[in-house]
């Protein structure tokens, strides 16, 4: 069980929350996107092994959304910050594997 | 080149050699073979899927299971003890009738069991109607059942090896070399290995491996847990799945109850699950089977499952030439092992999908032609 520090309610068990998946996915314009751009926006994710930014919803508490920086291997939570903010100053995230190896085709 | 030496990867190598005469094959596995999800699942085999595409694919796999011990000359301990899905609400009953109709149209066996038939089929099931979720009926697939998971990996590995396939254990892939949009080699601690065509069959780590070639997938990785009880004398002869109260279980040949349920809700690569999920599934189990209330649990573990948005597998080409992927089996890949290898071997050998997996490509996430088994098939996750 994770203990998630809700910015409004304090540390609570993860069973009170709903996991909202990766944070900062930029919404594509449905009128201007190709099928590929729209599909990428809807379904394709980084699925990072390591530090990631994600959204959580305190569904059985204050019912508010917020962002979390959490490591998907150790489950360590390193930062909690409001929706709409892109990053927190004290969070350093290592590059994901996506940036290693060959270029994207 | 096959990246991933689990059941699906080894089956792919076996059928490449057996069906297509492609024997210059290497299977790279980061640890020993079969110790990932192949050795961690709850060994349930069935083909009772709602949609035609899934039904045809899983039924092909089930037919291969029926002859697999003979095919591999290795006892897979395939036991067609039946898989029983229970309904707890009127809505589930209606869905069950719909699924039964779809299954019959696809030539897949199923039988509806009412209260009396359930009582005869599983006498220890509590059919009392005074509970929050009383059992209203069930649908059994008699040809479903269990198999020995390790034996499947070992059998395919031995058969593939005998035909000339190289199985390289303790050989993690650390990079994929892409030149002019074409995958040409993989990098490992043992050196760089050139390959004419690469198939990635890496389950929960599919996104990590494919990212090495700059390919993103519509996959999220989650822990899925299972647990076993202390061994007891034979008491449960069939597989029971209860999606609504959310538990499923069977009894192994050693006498342990093998119990599974939901995956964790958040994204993780840690091979451990949350304790509250165990608590919830055991609560459901005791509600169904009060006889197990004093049974002690012996072991618990988790594997990392690769879940696609429509809970159906992704088998086919990628934006990088000569790089193919077989992933997205999520919470239910074991049952498909021989069939998954069969169609992926065809796909790799011909550069084109087999008729059974042509609708399972990555393109469906752009065209919108999803194969939505998450909501419709009554699968247990």
Image (cartoon, coloured by chain):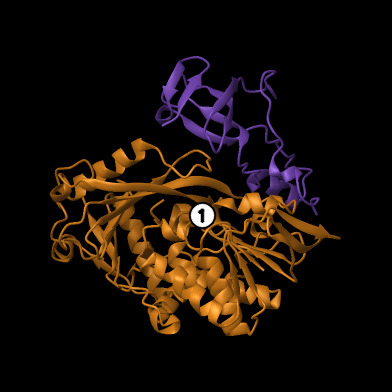
Chain colours: A purple, B orange
Please tell me which residue is depicted at 64% across the width and 71% down the height of the picture: B26
Q: Quadrant of residue B93?
A: bottom left
Q: Quadrant of the N terminus of chain B?
A: bottom right
Say how many tags the image has.
1
B375 and B219: which one is in front?
B219
Please tell me which residue is depicted at 71% across the width and 74% down the height of the picture: B351
- Residue B70 location in percent, x, y? 40, 84
B73 and A86: which one is in front?
B73
Please tell me which residue is depicted at 48% across the width and 68% down the height of the picture: B337
Examine the rendering and report whether any part of residue A66 can be seen: yes
| In the depicted structure, whether residue B83 falls above or below residue A89 | below
| In the depicted structure, whether residue A9 falls above or below residue A33 | above
Question: With B64 as the anchor, is B191 left or right in this view?
Answer: right
| In the depicted structure, whether residue B239 falls above or below residue B339 | above
Which chain contains the residue that carries disc 1? B
Q: Which residue is mark 1?
A: B311
- Residue B191 location in percent, x, y? 72, 60
| In the depicted structure, whether residue B99 falls above or below residue A77 | below
Please tell me which residue is depicted at 16% across the width and 59% down the height of the picture: B115
- Residue B334 location in percent, x, y? 44, 63
Q: Residues within 10 Å of mark 1 (few under 14, many from 20)?
A: many
Q: Residue furthest right?
A: B180
Examine the rendering and report whether any part of residue B58 can be seen: no
A97 and B54: which one is in front?
A97
Question: With B293 as the anchor, is B309 left or right in this view?
Answer: right
Provide the secondary structure element on which disc 1 rests. Answer: loop
Q: Residue furthest front?
A: B190
- Residue B202 location in percent, x, y? 58, 58
Q: Quadrant of residue B343?
A: bottom right
Question: With A55 as the anchor, is B303 left or right in this view?
Answer: left
């Amino acid at each position: 069980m994770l203990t998630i520090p809700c910015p409004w309610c304090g540390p609570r068990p993860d069973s009170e929350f709903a996991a909202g998946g990766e944070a900062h996915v930029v919404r594509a314009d449905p009128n201007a996107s190709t099928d590929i751009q729209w599909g990428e926006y809807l379904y394709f994710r980084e699925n990072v092994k390591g530090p990631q930014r994600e959204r959580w919803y305190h569904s059985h508490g204050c019912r508010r959304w917020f962002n979390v920086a959490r490591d998907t291997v150790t489950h360590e939570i390193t930062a909690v910050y409001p929706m709409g903010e892109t990053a927190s100053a004290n969070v350093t995230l290592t590059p994901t594997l996506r940036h290693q190896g060959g270029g994207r085709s | 080149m096959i990246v991933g030496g689990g059941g699906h990867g080894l089956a792919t190598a076996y059928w490449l050699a057996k069906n297509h005469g492609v024997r210059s094959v290497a299977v790279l596995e980061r640890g020993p073979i079969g110790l990932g999800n192949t050795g961690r699942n709850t060994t349930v085999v069935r083909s009772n899927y709602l949609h035609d595409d899934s039904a045809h694919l899983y039924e092909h796999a089930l037919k291969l299971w029926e002859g697999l011990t003979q095919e591999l000359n290795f006892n897979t301990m395939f036991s067609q003890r039946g898989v029983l899905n229970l309904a707890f609400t009127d809505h589930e009953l209606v869905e069950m009738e719909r699924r039964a109709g779809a299954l019959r149209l696809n030539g897949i066996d199923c039988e509806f069991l009412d209260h009396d038939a359930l009582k005869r089929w599983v006498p220890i099931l509590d059919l009392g109607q005074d509970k929050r979720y009383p059992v209203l009926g069930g649908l059994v697939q008699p040809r479903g059942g269990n198999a020995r998971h390790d034996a499947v990996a070992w059998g395919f590995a031995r058969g593939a090896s005998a035909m000339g396939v190289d199985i390289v254990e303790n050989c993690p892939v650390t990079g994929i070399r892409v030149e002019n949009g074409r995958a040409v080699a993989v990098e490992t601690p043992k050196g760089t290995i050139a390959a004419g065509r690469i198939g990635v069959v890496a389950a929960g780590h599919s996104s990590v491996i494919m990212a090495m070639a700059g390919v993103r997938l519509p996959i999220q990785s989650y822990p899925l847990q299972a647990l076993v009880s202390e061994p007891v004398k034979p008491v449960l002869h069939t597989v029971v799945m209860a999606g609504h109260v959310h538990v499923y279980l069977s009894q192994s040949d050693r006498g342990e109850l093998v119990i599974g349920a939901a995956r964790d809700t958040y994204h993780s690569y840690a091979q451990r699950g949350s304790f509250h999920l165990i608590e919830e599934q055991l609560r459901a189990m005791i509600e169904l089977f009060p006889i197990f209330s004093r049974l002690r649990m012996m072991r618990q573990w988790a594997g990392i499952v690769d879940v696609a948005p429509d809970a159906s597998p992704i088998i086919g080409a990628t934006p990088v030439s000569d790089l193919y992927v077989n992933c997205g089996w999520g919470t239910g890949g074991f049952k498909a092992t021989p069939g998954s290898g069969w169609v992926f071997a065809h796909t790799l050998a011909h550069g084109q999908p087999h008729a059974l997996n042509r609708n399972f490509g990555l393109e469906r996430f752009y065209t919108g032609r999803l194969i939505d088994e998450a909501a419709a098939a009554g699968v247990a996750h």
